[in-house]
Image: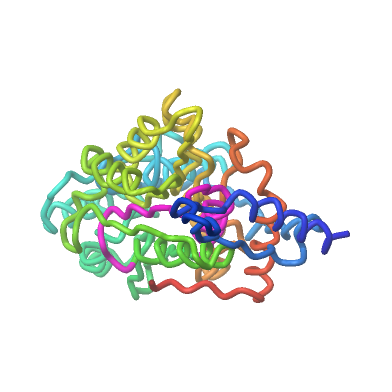
Amino acid sequence: MAFAAAVLSSALVLAGCARDTGTPAAGGDAAGTECARNAAPAAAGGAAAPSAAPIAPNADASALRVGLAFDVGGRGDQSFNDSAYAGLERAVAELGLVQDNTREVAAATGESEDARVSRLRQLATEGFSPVVAVGFAYSESLTTVAAEFPDTQFAIVDSVVDLPNVTSLTFAAEQGSFLVGAAAAMRTTSCQIGFVGGVEVPLIQAFEAGFVQGAKAVAPDVEVDVDYISPAGDFSGFNDPARGTEVARGQLDSGADVVYHAAGGSGQGVFEAVAAATTAEAPKYAIGVDSDQFNTVAAPTNEVIMTSMLKRVDVAVFNFINAVAAGDTSVLPQTFDLSVDGVGYSTTGGGVDDLVADLDAYKAAIINGDITVSSTP
C-alpha cells in the first residue's frame, strides 16, 4: 500500500509540472518540455518520520541570570532573533528562569567590532551567565570576551568558538532547506522556483544548497533562480526589505512561482513581492525561514506563505540554558539537525497539508542516512 501511495503521489504531482514552452508546429506535435518528478521515498503514505526525544530532563534554572545579545534587528524581526527569544521564554515557562533575571541587547546595522565586544563585556561584567550571542557576527567579539571572563558561560548561534566556556550552537540548515526545496518542486506549476539569500556567506549558502538539492530530488529538471541581496562582508542584506522585494520581483517576473528566502528581516520584502504578484488564476507562493512565518507575518501577506524552514534557534537556546542549569553542556548535540528537531518545516495555514506524507518520507530518509544533504552549493 505504501508503494502504491508513493506511485499515486508521484503521478499526481507529475501532472502538475508540465511546462509548455512553445506552440504546436504546423502539421506537427506541440513543442514543449516536461519537468518530470520522481516518486518520494517508499515511506510515503506509511509511517511518519521519527519524532525527536527530549535532549535532557528539565533542570532548575531559577538561580541563573541569562543575557541575550541579539543580531541586527533585535526582537521583532519575525525570524532569527524572535526564535532565540522564544527559547528564552520557554526557559522561563518550563525551567523556572526568572524573567527579571534576563537581559536583552541588540546589535545595530553597520556597527563596529568594538561595539559587539562592549555589548558582550557589559553583560558579563553585570554578572549574566550564561550569555547567548545570537549570530555568527559575534564570532570575533565573543572570542575576545570569553577569554576575559573564563568563569562566565557563553553560547554562540551559527558559529564555532573553540574555548572551554563557549558552547557553539550550530544547525543542519541544509536538511530543513532540503525539505522545503522538495515542497517547492512539488508545488510549482512553472517548473521554476527561486532562492533569495541575505548575504552571500557559507552559512546562507547551506540554505541554498539544501533547497536546490531537495528540489532536484523531486524534479531533476526544475529551474532554480539563486540571488543574494548583499555580498560577503555587507550584512545589510539581512535587514533591507526594499531590496528583498526588488530581488524577489525579478525572480517572479522571470517565471518563478515559488520563492524561498534566507534573508532575515529582508524576507518581509520577499513576501510582499510574492503577495503583489499572486492572482487567483496564477497563484504564487513564498517560503519563510527560521520561525513559523505564517504566524509572525501580518495578514493578508502571510497567506502566500506555504511553509517555513524552521531553524529551531529556540530549541537550541532552551536546551543550552537547561544544560547550564544542570551543570553539563556535554549533553548537547554537536549539530541541531532533523533528528533532534533542530530544523524542520512548518504546516501552519495548511499550505503543505497535501505534501506532508512525501515530506516526512524525505525527512525519515535523511534521518536514517539514506539521503545525505550537502551544505555547499
Task: List the single residue furthest toward the front.
Answer: 27
* Residue bounds of the magenta highlight: 175-202
Q: Is residue 110 magenta?
A: no
Task: List the single residue furthest toward the top.
Answer: 300
Apparent side of residue 364 relative to residue 28 in the rendered image (left or right): right
Apparent side of residue 297 relative to residue 105 in the rendered image (left or right): right
Q: Residue at x 52, y 66 (%)?
A: 216
Q: From the top left corner, tell me how far across and down residue 256 is, in percent.
A: 40, 48
Q: Quadrant of the C terminus?
A: bottom left
Q: From the top left corner, tell me how far across and down residue 294 is, in percent.
A: 50, 34
The image quadrant of residue 241 is: top left
Q: Using the image as rendered, state which of residue 5 and residue 239 is in the foreground.
A: 5
Apparent side of residue 283 relative to residue 4 in the rendered image (left or right): left
Note whether 229 is above or below 300 in the view shown: below
Q: From the top left corner, tell me how far across and down residue 324 is, in percent.
A: 49, 58
Q: Residue at x 79, y 55 (%)?
A: 45
Q: Is residue 325 visible?
A: no
Apparent side of residue 114 relative to residue 352 in the rendered image (left or right): left
Q: Using the image as rendered, state which of residue 328 and residue 23 is in the foreground.
A: 23
Q: Using the image as rendered, state which of residue 20 and residue 103 is in the foreground.
A: 20
Q: Quadrant of the N terminus?
A: bottom right
